[in-house]
Amino acid sequence: MKPLVPHELHSFAPVRATMNSDLATVAEPHESVIRDSHDRCLELGLNPRDHIDYSMETLADFKLAQERCARLQAQALPVMEMLLEQVSGTGNIVCLADDKGTILMSAGHSGSVDFAERVALRPGVSWSEAAKGTNAVGTALVTERDIFVHANEHYIQSNHVLTCSASPIMDHSGGVIGVLDVTGEHYSFHPHTMALVRVAARTIENYWFCDNFSRNLRLHFHFRPELIGTMVEGVIALSADGKILGVNRAGLQLLGTSSAAARIQGVRVVFGMDFGALMDRLRSHSMAPLQMRLPDGRMLYARAQCNDASLGQHFHFGQTRASEARAHATPASPAPEPPATPTSTRAATAARHAPDLNELARGDARLAQVVDQVRRVLDRDIPILILGETGTGKEVLASALHGASQRKDQAFVAVNCASIPETLIESELFGYEEGAFTGAKRRGSAGKLLQAHGGTLFLDEIGDMPLSLQARLLRVLQERKVVPLGGQKANDVDINLVCATHRNLREMIERGEFREDLYYRINGLAVRLPRLCERTDLRVVCRRLISQLSPQHPLGISEELLAEFEAYAWPGNLRQLHNVLRTACVMAGTDREITRVHLPMDFLEDLSSARGQRQTGQGAQSGQAAGATPTLPPQSAGGDTASLGDVLHELKLSTIRQTLAACNGNVTEAAKRLNISRNTIYRKLKAVGDRPA
């Protein structure tokens, strides 16, 4: 089987804490699990000295097994291919077995296929404990838990050359429907493999669950909103009248309940509110995840989805007017009003999770200056405009500003003007009355401006706001009143305004793309966040992020890797660093320190590319010492010299162009000379609108 390119390679590493808890569950009783399996094999009368059993099921039985598991194979295939790419170069083979231990399909690169034939890891062969003794596939089926079996832990001596990691795949009712396994030669053992197999199996489970309930309303939830949409999210399926139909394994772990208990208890007990109230709140949070407090006091974030258009086209999660009517017919507590009091749950939560403004300024002089400037205008009714590249932490700073202000007990409402469709942004910002337009929900919507009343409104990427709405926003900011769409009454609005953009608003004004009067209205104080490569506190930021991403397992980071990080350009800034470290924390497993081996492959390629460019740059500097004259970026219009990041960026482009010219435009040859990939050359040139000859 030819492996596909893993487009979602990094989704194999969503959360460190979840992995650690699972690893602890596997590691502590491991010896006793192996010992119990050996005892079972002894009772079965298996001989440890038996030769490798190559016998297969009859062709008819195997075809029946494949037909019975056709859906499982279809959903597992893309995940297996991604998993194969993760373990490429180790000689491992990825296998899928049915609920009886029969191998349904296997995948491996050249070389590993021959290995699979030698050890009978091929479709049609049974790897149940009764057939092969203690092994990952068979023991996972018996124990219904993740398990690795290494070298002489196998009961049959001929299998001592193997190291295997397997995870059972379960349906929503808790029944095992198959097993995912990675097997290689014993010297290829690595503790990361078990974590990869576990995550891949949970991904297949989620595919199975969502496919099983594709025509039902599903709530995707987690205690951390950024993990909704990953394989560690909880998913709960609901019927049209609000009955719980099923919960995936991650959801049961998050809620601390069983599948049967959740179905019996129902929505009111599990979520602490009636189905009608839950639907009302979900409809009002169609863009952002809904915050809800569980009966035990924990804060949960949820988003609704449904693939069946027949359930309705009115709401983003696909609920019809008929089902909406049923929801409202259910006795329900009234939907909460927009937060406007200090006792608001949402406001209190925002204040509690807001980053500390003082913490942002530790270690970097430029950032400290920014924090000092914004602190001086806090609570002075002066709008703040945050400038900076994508990923530099503009929303983090805005949230910290809110947490340090006198409005910290009120709402912090963030609106990304670039992510909301132009047809919806007006209703999202200003709200609307009942019947204002086709599809408007019953009782209307307050809108983000009124939701932020008394608190802070953060307009992210305001440079992407349609020109037609800029005039209306200016009017609201000047008059401090907002009239919802379809309404007549003007509502007072008292907000602290913070805006952010990565665009050059002055250039947009000259092109007629941004209103000059709005620019001066939002620009009471403009501050610019430095790019990550310009900051001097990268080591502090790395260690702080690692402690946040791995709270249950203290992790360090090697000095050599930190040195490479400091020399890297970080085009994605803090967001890129966060994603890289999140993956590294998962890949580190039980290791105590993050090193290069824990980094994603594409990022390692970028690091190697950056190292090659630095070496080329050093060679160019040697040429300059012999009389060559370097070409540096021109001074900015204001007379200030370009930043160090700009200089490095221009040197990289100049080096690539010169090397291409020396190679007569041959990209492959230029990539070899620069020790970078061809894709890197194309990407660098495309970013500046250039292309190889």
Image (tube, rainbow, N blue to C red):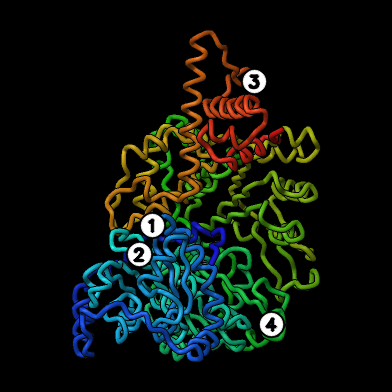
Find residue 320 and report its horizontal and vertical position in percent.
71, 81
Q: Is residue 79 left or right of residue 297?
A: right
Find residue 261 and report its horizontal and vertical position in percent.
41, 88
Which residue corresponds to mark 2?
A: 184
Mark 3 or mark 2: whose residue is earlier in sequence? 2
Q: Secondary structure at mark 2?
A: strand
Q: Do tag 2 and tag 1 residues touch (Cβ < 8 Å)? A: yes
Q: Is residue 77 visible?
A: yes
Q: Nearer the viewer, residue 473 or 99?
A: 99
Which residue corresponds to mark 3?
A: 638
Mark 2 or mark 4: whose residue is earlier in sequence? 2
- Gap in angstroms between the C-alphas marked 3 and 4: 58 Å
Identify which amino acid the numbered label 2 is placed on: Gly
Residue 311 is tagged as: 4
Could you classify mark 4 by the number of other residues whose Cα lies within 10 Å: few (under 14), some (14-19), or many (20 or more)? many
Q: Is residue 636 left or right of residue 194?
A: right
- Gap in angstroms between the C-alphas marked 3 and 1: 55 Å
Which residue corresponds to mark 1?
A: 90
Mark 3 or mark 4: whose residue is earlier in sequence? 4
- Gap in angstroms between the C-alphas marked 4 and 1: 48 Å
Answer above or below: position of 65 versus 28: below
Answer above or below: position of 475 versus 490: above
Mark 3 or mark 1: whose residue is earlier in sequence? 1
Residue depth check, mark 3 versus mark 2: number of the one nearer the observer: 2
Residue at left offset 38%, top offset 55%: 549
Identify which amino acid the numbered label 4 is placed on: Leu
Residue at left offset 40%, top offset 81%: 125
